[in-house]
């Protein structure tokens, strides 16, 4: 939960200093007024990166040399001050004055999810987004997930470096034991959180799409084999490719929809609903584990959705009880709940309604 948010020189926003509602906030403005930039700035403060995939230097307002973001968060009665500054010297992160935790400390202080017009990629795009989706839940639900993930990444890098250097099969095999051990940690924790999230996934899927959805973890190597066997048998191919072909870095979350593969079947609007259902389920799962409301950013939720679908999405969002910052072209276009705090934005300048 973030109750105060200050921005300077981020994209088209020269300065903004907003007092946000713990419930529903609505940012209204014409095209190119700065709505998405505002959400991008909020998300940057909670992640240390852009959800639009923009490089950090492109986020600095044209003609300026740095941007600064600052927020006051509150979680179960505990307030924190968090800040990010990007200048020529690089990125500086502060959580209550300390720069030690980096982006992970931001994510712990301001956990958030985003539903934007690109959200359908979670369903229609490649497996990486779905792995990240699962890892996000795991990061908030499983205490050791981040640590296991980082150690696995290091082991993968070392093994891949040995493959690229065309080391002998014996030298490459010598990495396998550690690789397999760390892979098992990551694999276990993803399976556990998927298990925890399954009810919520089915529930939100039904609420938004009116159909039964299935979610299945594909581990990233042949189910009939142990990872050791898969690595052993795949060593020639790994050497050819210069990269490890089997392991949890190749995992996927398979979604079934009316007993067929969702990504082949559904329309863009349905993909957006399905992806939104997944994000709401992840948010609820993390909220339950953390025992506090999270922040949900809804960028132009009306895009691609008919009135009825948009209504169902907003109803599900309201039931979730998280803090929301949504954007819309016009104030009346989104049926936001009573007590919504509205801001108008024009050329990067925000005014409370
Ligand atoms: N680094 C930057 N400096 C200044 N302006 C920028 C920068 N990056 C993007 N813009 C401008 O910000 C404006 C607002 O963009 P955006 O937030 O996407 O608008 P909206 O979501 O309201 O349609 C656009 O006109 C864009 O050209
Ligand atoms: Mg926009």
Image: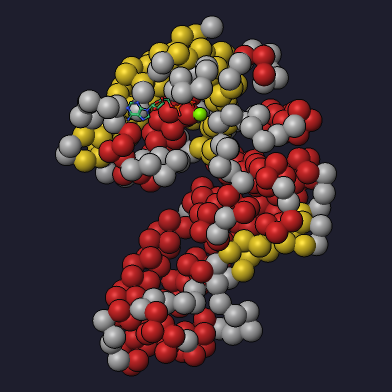
Residue at x-position 43% and y-position 63%: 148
Relative horizontal placement of residue 47, taking residue 223 as reference (left or right): left
Q: Which residue is more in the foreground, 302 or 247?
A: 302
Relative horizontal placement of residue 50, taking residue 201 as reference (left or right): left
Hey, which residue is sitting farthest front in the picture? Answer: 31
Tell me the quadrant of the picture where the C terminus can be found: top right
Residue 3, compared with residue 228, is above or below; it is: above
- On the image, the x and y values in percent for residue 87 come to 21, 34
Where ligand 1 lies, by image quadrant? top left
- On the image, the x and y values in percent for residue 217 come to 63, 65
The reply to whether residue 30 is visible in this rendering is: yes
The reply to whether residue 42 is visible in this rendering is: no
- On the image, the x and y values in percent for residue 263 come to 67, 57
- On the image, the x and y values in percent for residue 287 come to 59, 39
Residue 134, compared with residue 152, is above or below; it is: above
Residue at x-position 33% and y-position 34%: 59
Residue 207, compared with residue 62, is above or below; it is: below
Give the quarter of the image for residue 17.
top left
Residue at x-position 82% and y-position 44%: 210
Residue at x-position 40% and y-position 40%: 50
Give the quarter of the image for residue 324.
top right
Q: Which residue is more in the foreground, 349 or 201?
A: 349
């Amino acid at each position: 939960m973030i109750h105060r948010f200050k921005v300077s020189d981020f994209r088209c926003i020269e300065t903004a200093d907003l007092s946000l509602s713990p419930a529903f906030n609505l940012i209204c403005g014409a095209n190119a007024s700065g709505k998405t930039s505002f959400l991008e700035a909020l998300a940057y403060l909670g992640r240390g990166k852009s959800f639009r995939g923009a490089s950090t230097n492109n986020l600095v307002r044209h003609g300026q040399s740095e941007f600064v973001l600052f927020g006051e968060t509150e979680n179960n009665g505990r307030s924190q001050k968090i800040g990010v500054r990007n200048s020529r010297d690089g990125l500086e992160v502060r959580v209550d004055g300390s720069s030690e935790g980096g982006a992970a400390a931001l994510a712990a202080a301001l956990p958030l999810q985003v539903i934007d017009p690109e959200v359908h990629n979670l369903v229609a795009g490649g497996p990486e987004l779905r792995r990240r989706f699962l890892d996000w839940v795991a990061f908030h639900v499983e205490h050791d997930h981040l640590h296991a993930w980082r150690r696995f990444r290091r082991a993968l890098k070392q093994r891949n470096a040995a493959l690229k250097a065309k080391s002998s099969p014996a030298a490459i095999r010598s990495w396998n034991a550690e690789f397999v051990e760390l892979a098992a940690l990551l694999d276990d924790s993803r399976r556990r959180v998927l298990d925890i999230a399954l009810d919520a996934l089915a529930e939100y899927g039904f609420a938004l799409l009116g159909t039964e959805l299935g979610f299945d973890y594909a581990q990233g190597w042949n189910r009939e084999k142990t990872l050791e066997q898969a690595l052993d048998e795949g060593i020639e191919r790994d050497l050819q490719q210069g990269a490890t072909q089997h392991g949890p870095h190749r995992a996927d979350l398979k979604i079934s929809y009316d007993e067929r593969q969702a990504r082949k079947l559904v329309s863009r609007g349905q993909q957006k609903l399905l992806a939104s259902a997944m994000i709401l389920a992840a948010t609820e799962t993390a909220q339950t584990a953390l025992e506090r409301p999270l922040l949900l950013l809804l960028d132009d939720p009306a895009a691609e959705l008919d009135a009825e679908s948009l209504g169902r999405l907003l109803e599900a969002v309201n039931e979730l009880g998280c803090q929301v910052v949504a954007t819309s072209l016009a104030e009346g276009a989104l049926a936001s709940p009573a007590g919504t705090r509205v801001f108008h934005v024009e050329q990067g300048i925000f005014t409370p309604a």
